[in-house]
Image: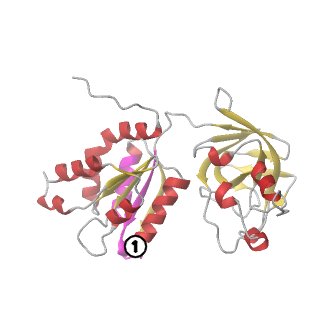
Amino acid sequence: MEKDSIYKGIVRAVCTSPAKGTEKKPVEEGHFIAGFGIERDAHAGKWHRQVSLLSYDKVEDFNAKGAGVTDGAFGENLLVEGIDFKNLPVGTILRAGSVVLKMTQIGKECHESCAIRKRVGDCIMPREGVFAEVLEGGIIKAGDEIYAELPAEDRPFTAAVITVSDKGSRGERKDESGPAAADMLKEAGYEITEMLILPDEPALLKNAFIRLVDRRQVDLIVTSGGTGFSLRDQTPEATLAVADRLAPGISEYIRMRSMEKTNRAMLSRGVSVIRKQTLIVNLPGSPRAVRESLEFILDSLDHGLKILRGSASECARKE
């Protein structure tokens, strides 16, 4: 790593495929389109995984075991020598010529139809690959230099919003709580990376937490719903199951302030926890309660999230 926090690598191959689930093949050059991906590549689209990248060194290590895979076999668009993508944070900026990419995810779940896994019995893309979106377009070809620039400490916080509702997930009820939370977070300067509606199924919620924290590295996750006394209300249990540490003061403060408006606030079982460098906060299910809860805590969350990110220090309050 250089003093200016920039890594340098060389593009060994640019690869595309006409269909998902198939091995990609090297092409002479890739035409990168802002907000979309690589022209004529099956994985291009209006989503956060527009371009996939893999470290050439990891493929070499894999082939040293006798696998004999070729460029693009793991489904990577860009095979790069000299940069260990897995150890870079989400938000890293990648530059090659006029093309600018932004890392959005580390690793992925391997699907059953993975061509390389079927052929050689293993696939390193879920463990070592990363994904990016195209911020600025242009052309990349083999032999081009590529630079990785670590994200700025003062970048906006990222957030994901999850509504937990059986009826909402089936389309039987319009979700108003999730958009209410997202709107308030946007107004506070957060970048909303994902909005999800999930049924009251703890396993699904836990998997969403793990993906958003471990792979997308969002700073904040807020949930709405599933915090009451119903047998289906298990959002707090799913949240605790993925926690590394507790942050009880946040939920305690929400309940305390909410008691000023209704005594039923004591019946909310929402929790707040930390997983790695992500804060997860459970909010009630109604749009009004969501807005009130966020109003109570948003100002103070800024400092806590900066501490988690490492861009602020914990200091005692001065008298």
- Furthest-top residue in this view: 319
Which corner quadrant holds the C terminus? top left
Mark 1 Cα-neighbour bin, 10 Å: few <14, some 14–19, many ≥20: some
Quadrant where the N terminus sits is top right
54 relative position to 317: left or right: right
| Residue type indicated by callout 1 | Glu
- Residue 118 spot, x, y in % from top left: 75, 74
Residue 41 image point, x, y percent: 75, 61
Name the residue: 25% across, 61% down: 269
Disc 1 element: loop
Residue at the farthest front position? 65
Q: Which residue is mark 1?
A: 201
Q: Is residue 29 left or right of residue 108?
A: right
Marker count (numbered): 1
Residue 173 to residue 69: above or below: below
Residue 19 visible? no
Query: Is residue 170 one of those drawn in magenta?
Result: yes
At horizontal 41% and vertical 52% (from top left) the residue drawn is 244
Give percent across and percent down for residue 93.
Answer: 64, 40
Q: Which residues, given as a range, are shown in magenta?
A: 158-185
**Closer to the camera in the image, 151 or 65:** 65
- How are the colours assigned in the image? secondary structure
Residue occupying the point 61% across, 41% down:
92
Residue 92 appears anywhere in the view: yes
